[in-house]
Image (cartoon, helix red, strand yellow):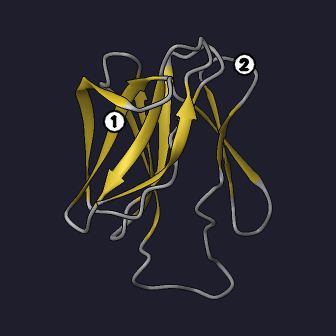
């Protein structure tokens, strides 16, 4: 298993990190401190190759980009972890040199519920995760 970084919740007092192997990835939550002590709940994602989670500015959503088998972005309500969106970006097994998605191409905008996804052409896709 390996850990791929730490994302802090905007309200403070909580961090998220990934622990992954080839079969699944766990988004684990902890209170910040000298040592990560994981809480009793986690988000389980199929496969590996997930990027670091991103919290919305108001902390109500968590987005994560990745998956070995299908480039996708998943959006979850927080703290319920109920999935609200699955956005497919294409099949990584059929790469197109002129159309390669970056792994760190997801960010929430200043407006709550707005997710930005950078495309291979350099444009931004805007997705409203609430509708």
| Up-down relation of residue 48 to residue 108 (above or below) | below
Check disc 2 and report the residue beneath it. Answer: 111
The answer to which of marks 1 and 2 sits earlier in the sequence is 1
- In front here: 104 or 13? 13
- In front here: 59 or 121? 59
> Is residue 118 something that shows in the picture?
yes
Task: Indicate the quadrant where residue 27 lies.
Answer: top left
Question: Any mark on residue 28, and which?
Answer: 1
Residue 4 location in percent, x, y? 47, 54
Residue at screen point 64% across, 88% down:
97
Counting labels gives 2
Residue at screen point 43% across, 57% down:
50
Residue at screen point 43% across, 32% down:
35
Please indicate whether residue 42 sits to the left or right of residue 35 in the image. left
Task: Indicate the quadrant where residue 1 lies.
Answer: bottom left
Residue 123 location in percent, x, y? 79, 57
Residue at screen point 58% across, 62% down:
103
Question: Any mark on residue 1, and which?
Answer: none
> Is residue 130 something that shows in the picture?
no
Task: Indicate the quadrant where residue 94 lies.
Answer: bottom left
Mark 1 falls on what kind of element?
strand
Query: Tag 2: Cα neighbours inside 10 Å, few (<14), some, or many (≥20)?
Result: few
Please indicate whether residue 43 sits to the left or right of residue 55 in the image. left
| Up-down relation of residue 31 to residue 34 (above or below) | above
Query: Tag 1: Cα neighbours inside 10 Å, few (<14), some, or many (≥20)?
Result: many
What's the CA distance linking mark 1 and mark 2?
A: 26 Å
């Amino acid at each position: 298993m390996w850990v791929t970084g730490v994302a802090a919740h905007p309200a403070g007092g909580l961090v998220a990190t990934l622990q992954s192997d080839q079969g699944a990835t766990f988004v684990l939550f902890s209170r910040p401190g000298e040592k990560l002590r994981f809480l009793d709940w986690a988000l389980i994602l199929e496969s590996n190759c997930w990027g670091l989670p991103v919290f919305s500015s108001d902390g109500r959503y968590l987005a994560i980009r990745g998956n070995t088998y299908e480039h996708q972005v998943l959006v979850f309500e927080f703290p319920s972890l109920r999935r609200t969106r699955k956005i497919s970006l294409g099949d990584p097994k059929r790469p197109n040199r002129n159309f390669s998605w970056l792994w760190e191409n997801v960010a929430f905008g200043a407006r709550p519920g707005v997710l930005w996804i950078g495309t291979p052409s350099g444009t931004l896709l805007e997705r409203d995760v609430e509708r």
